[in-house]
Image (cartoon, rainbow, N blue to C red):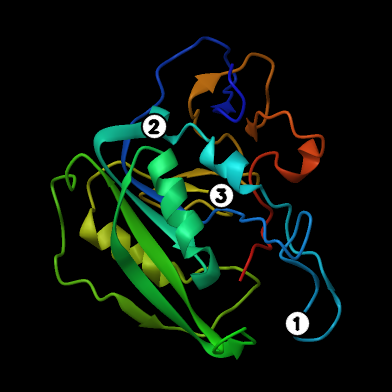
Amino acid sequence: MANSEIIGAGKDTARRAPKKYQIIYADPPWLYKCGKNHLARTSMINGKDDFHYPAMSLDEIKRMNIQSISGEDCLVFMWVTSPFLKYGIDTLYSWGFEYSTVGFVWYKQKPNPGSYTLSECELCIVGKRGKIPKPRGKRNIRQFLSSMREAHSKKPDEIRNRIFSMFPVLNKIELFARQRVEGWDAWGNEIEESPVLGEESPAQNNMEICHTAPNSASVQAGKTPGQHT
């Protein structure tokens, strides 16, 4: 199996074709330059060490075999911080998608320090493969959301709910998820018996990212509940 293919295992070891999804919702554990495997070694806010989650390098994220679970017509809704917008778009193309638009803008109501202006918003960009999948649901969903940020990196449930309203009957999956939500499949290190993504690997009990990086513990199965802001 090639490096960084997404794999998983059920209780049986028979190979089977992965389920195809028309809607993919992802919050990748971006590796920022200010730390080896976390958001920041020293917080800009309080000066304390800031170990929140095991991150993945950009190359590891880009090598994930997302096409193996993508339908012919498919959308990816991906969270990125503003400094990582370029890398998020690059990742969409690596996954086999074209950048389409900014789907959602989340105003966190509590600014962080920034190099230019205060960091107050996070973006959820949209990538498209083929055409916009059908059938569609609501067509009047708002792009902007003002919602106080909660736990570190936790995204507002309202965004997932809005995506569901846009495509209520299509196959949907959340990657790097921390909980199961009705109407969605979920994949992540906090999810038991996650669906198989890509090829199955016999004798594997938990999903992981196959790779050759020396620090394997930092990239197995995505990220922990504490993710980037």
Describe the element under mark 1 as helix, strand or loop. Answer: loop
Q: Position of residue 198 (x, y in %)?
A: 48, 25
Query: Which quadrant of the figure contains the C terminus?
Result: bottom right
Describe the element under mark 3 as helix, strand or loop. Answer: loop
**Type of the residue with mark 2:** Gln
Which residue lies under the disc numbered 2?
Answer: 67
Q: Are marks 2 and 3 in contact (CB under 8 Å)?
A: no
Q: Are marks 1 and 2 in contact (CB under 8 Å)?
A: no
Q: Which numbered disc, 2 or 3, marks the residue that appears first in the sequence?
A: 2
* Residue 220 position (above or below residue 32): above
Q: Nearer the viewer, mark 2 or mark 3?
A: 2
Label 1 and label 3: CA atoms lie apart by 26 Å
Which residue lies under the disc numbered 1?
Answer: 44
* Residue 164 position (above or below residue 219): below
Q: Position of residue 115 (x, y in %)?
A: 62, 83
Label 2 and label 3: CA atoms lie apart by 16 Å
Q: Nearer the viewer, mark 1 or mark 2?
A: 1
In the foreground, 145 or 165: 145
- Binning the other alpha carbons within 10 Å of mark 3 as few (below 14), some (14 to 19) or many (20 upward) gives many
Give the quadrant of residue 83. Answer: bottom right
Q: Position of residue 13 (x, y in %)?
A: 58, 12
**Type of the residue with mark 3:** Phe
Which residue occupies the extreme front position in the image? Answer: 116
Query: Which quadrant of the figure contains the N terminus?
Result: top right
**Type of the residue with mark 1:** Met
Which residue lies under the disc numbered 3?
Answer: 176
In the foreground, 85 or 110: 85
In the foreground, 12 or 83: 83
